[in-house]
Image: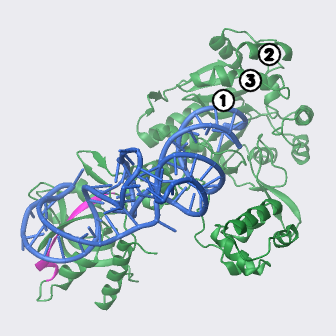
Chain colours: A green, B blue
RNA sequence: GACUUGGUAGCUCAGCAGGUAGAGCAUCACACUUUUAAUGUGGGGGUCCUGGGUUCGAGCCCCAGCCAGGUCACCA
């Protein structure tokens, strides 16, 4: 069912055809300038500069005053006002192009191309005086109308559900949205350039993996028909990149779309972009410097400054970032020195700090819980937390000064983890032992413990040079750069539950699985929108429900037997 | 997954004690040759998310469901 406005637009479309105007022309429209170029470079003393512009875009507002009109044209970069005059658009006797096509048949949202010259109106606004108008594409649905005066937006299109489901509309009417995604791409460009200048190689590794390794997370699972094996969408690309270091590259990196079958909220999307880099002959101390440089440079490239507002906090990416070990951080934030404590003592500390724990948690996990609950949120300015317990870092080399710890750092910004890095574990014997510890944790009920990857161990046995690796959550980093607090705002198409299908099952669909016509009618009326939905019902419950309806409506049919209902469902 | 808030015109939102559904913008018609949230006059547009219940009567109250937001849990 079309709304009134949609019907009117379809009628206009037909009228355009009748006038011999193709609302969806094939021919290219020559664009020789953008709205922003005109606005930035217009010179009142040099009108010749833009005396012959040709520009395409959407009509975003219209002010019609009889024989003269103003409207705003929006292209990829911004908006510019158009001035149209009836007798200039239509120099001859026939005024159809202005009176009928422009005033009546064109709407907000339509794409048009105009040719003319730039000038400044009496009100001082740089505009285009239109001499010629071409219809480029008719829009059949009305756009949300956002008005603005003195920088204040009115009737902004801000329903998150509609914005995320129809990002195309969001991008058209909310100019800030476009800006976020431009910054996202610039940030990725900047990082890529930095790595390439260092001589490191961008690579592509498998998204479909038979062992989902490199991180602790529940994977998405799929099936490969030809091989008849399960395959997992990658949760990380770490183990593949390290294989490449074994193979002899001295630096590799990948922007990796990762998939994790876990909850969704304002900082989690089922698919997200990770960046991992591995550099041979380096350690985590070098990587801290390198990460600092990368982030500072990226901020300068994207924002032109190393300061950004996120919520109420001004975050500064000025180097050097603060560095503190995890144990010192816990001491600083809780006053408790956990150095050298055993599992029993750590449990006591958690109890004392009122941190919820469960028996499956090992020593490392307990320390992580303390840090997460009492420390993490306090690091607003970029801070490297270093030297994590060995139990929670199965791919990381032991600390040179303390075998209970690892050479690992995480970068905290705005109270959240942004990057994670190691001096990589390249001792194959130790690596095998660490995987085995993970298996034990899995046995204790930790369903996220890592799965052992024999081929990766084989690779290490061939020898991996000393290596440092770093991973960064690109989405979260972009959130910081753009001051966003929701991951959905930095993903063009965030995951949403599919829209309810409008196409609903008919009584014939139910009759096809053996439901008698009378009952099929009841099912349709009861809003069973699909056969699948019916089949999800418990037979006994469904029978009861339907017989209840029979009784209530005094239906002239025998009561349903359980066998009948079971027959439909199975 | 738990708790919580919301779903009314194309968009943003009102609505009351339960008694024929409202505004602004948009849209349609008319007027208007430098307006800019253009203006003036008049008109049209609704599955009040879905289904059930209570009631003489439900957008409003009750139950179930769907979708979204927020908070928490898990994770990056």
Q: Residues within 10 Å of mark 2 (few under 14, many from 20)?
A: some
| Drawn side of residue A532 relative to residue A148, left or right | right
- The residue to which callout 1 is attached is A410
Sequence-earlier tag: 3 or 1: 3
- Give residue A87's mark: none
Which quadrant holds residue A12? bottom left
Local packing at callout 3 (Cα closer than 10 Å; few below 14, some 14-19, many 20+) is: few
Q: x, y percentage for residue B8?
A: 42, 58
**Horizontal arrangement in the rendering, residue A332 relative to residue A103 (left or right):** right
Residue A76 picture location, percent across and down: 37, 61
Give the distance between the C-alpha atoms of the residues marked 3 and 2, in whole angstroms: 12 Å
Q: Are marks 2 and 1 on the same chain?
A: yes
Q: Is residue A398 visible?
A: no
Report the chain holding disc 2: A
- Of residues A553 and A230, the one nearer the viewer is A553
Q: Which mark is residue A346?
A: 2
Residue drawn 62% across the image and 72% down it: A504
Name the residue beneath numbered marker 3.
Answer: A356
Q: Quadrant of the C terminus of chain A?
A: bottom right
Q: Is residue A445 magenta?
A: no
Residue drawn 74% across and 47% down? A235
């Amino acid at each position: 069912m079309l709304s009134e406005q949609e019907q009117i637009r379809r009628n206009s479309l037909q009228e355009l055809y009748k006038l011999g105007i193709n609302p969806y022309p094939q021919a290219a429209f020559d664009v020789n300038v953008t709205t922003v170029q005109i606005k930035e470079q217009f010179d009142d003393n040099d009108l010749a500069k833009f005396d012959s512009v040709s520009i395409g875009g959407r009509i975003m507002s219209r002010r019609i005053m009889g024989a003269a009109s103003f409207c705003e044209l929006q292209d990829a970069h911004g908006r510019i006002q158009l001035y149209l005059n009836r007798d200039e658009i239509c120099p001859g006797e026939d005024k159809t192009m202005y009176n009928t096509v422009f005033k009546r048949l064109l709407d907000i949202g339509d794409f048009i191309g105009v040719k003319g010259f730039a000038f400044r109106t009496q009100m001082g606004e740089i505009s285009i005086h239109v001499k010629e108008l071409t219809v480029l594409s008719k829009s059949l649905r009305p756009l949300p109308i956002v008005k603005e005066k003195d920088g204040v937006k009115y009737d902004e299109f801000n329903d998150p559900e509609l914005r995320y489901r129809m990002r195309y509309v969001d991008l058209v009417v909310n100019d800030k949205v476009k800006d976020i995604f431009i910054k996202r791409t610039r940030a990725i460009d900047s990082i890529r350039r930095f790595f390439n200048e260092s001589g490191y190689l961008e690579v592509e590794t498998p998204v479909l993996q038979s062992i989902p390794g490199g991180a602790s997370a529940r994977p998405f699972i799929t099936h490969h028909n030809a091989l008849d094996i399960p395959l997992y969408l990658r949760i990380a690309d770490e183990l593949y990149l390290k294989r490449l270091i074994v193979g002899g590259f001295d630096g590799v990196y990948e922007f990796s779309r990762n998939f994790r079958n876990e909850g969704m909220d304002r900082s989690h999307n089922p698919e997200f972009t990770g960046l991992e880099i591995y550099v041979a002959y380096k350690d985590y101390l070098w990587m801290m410097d390198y990460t600092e440089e990368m982030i500072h440079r990226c901020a300068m490239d994207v924002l032109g400054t190393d300061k950004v507002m996120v919520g109420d906090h001004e975050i500064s990416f000025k180097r050097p970032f603060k560095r503190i070990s995890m144990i010192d951080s816990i001491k600083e934030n809780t006053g408790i020195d956990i150095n050298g404590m055993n599992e029993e003592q750590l449990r006591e500390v958690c109890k004392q700090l009122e941190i919820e724990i469960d028996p499956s948690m090992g020593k490392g996990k307990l320390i992580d819980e303390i840090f997460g609950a009492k420390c993490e949120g306090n690091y607003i300015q970029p801070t490297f937390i270093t030297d994590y317990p060995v139990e929670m870092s199965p791919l990381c080399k032991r600390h040179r000064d303390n075998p209970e710890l690892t050479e690992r750092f995480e970068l905290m910004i705005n109270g959240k983890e942004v990057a994670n890095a190691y001096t990589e574990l390249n001792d194959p014997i130790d690596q095998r032992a660490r995987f085995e510890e993970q298996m034990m944790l899995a046995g204790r009920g930790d369903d996220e413990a890592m799965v052992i990857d024999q081929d990766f161990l084989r690779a290490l046995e061939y020898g991996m040079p000393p290596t440092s690796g770093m991973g960064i959550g690109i989405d979260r980093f972009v959130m910081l750069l753009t001051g966003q607090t929701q991951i959905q705002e930095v993903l063009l198409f965030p995951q949403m539950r599919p829209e309810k299908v409008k196409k609903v099952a008919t009584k014939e669909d139910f009759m096809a699985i053996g439901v008698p016509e009378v009952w099929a009618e009841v099912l349709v009326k009861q809003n069973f929108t699909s056969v699948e939905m019916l089949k999800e019902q418990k037979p006994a419950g469904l029978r009861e429900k339907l017989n209840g309806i029979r009784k209530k409506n005094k239906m002239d049919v025998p009561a349903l037997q359980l066998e009948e209902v079971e027959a439909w469902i199975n």
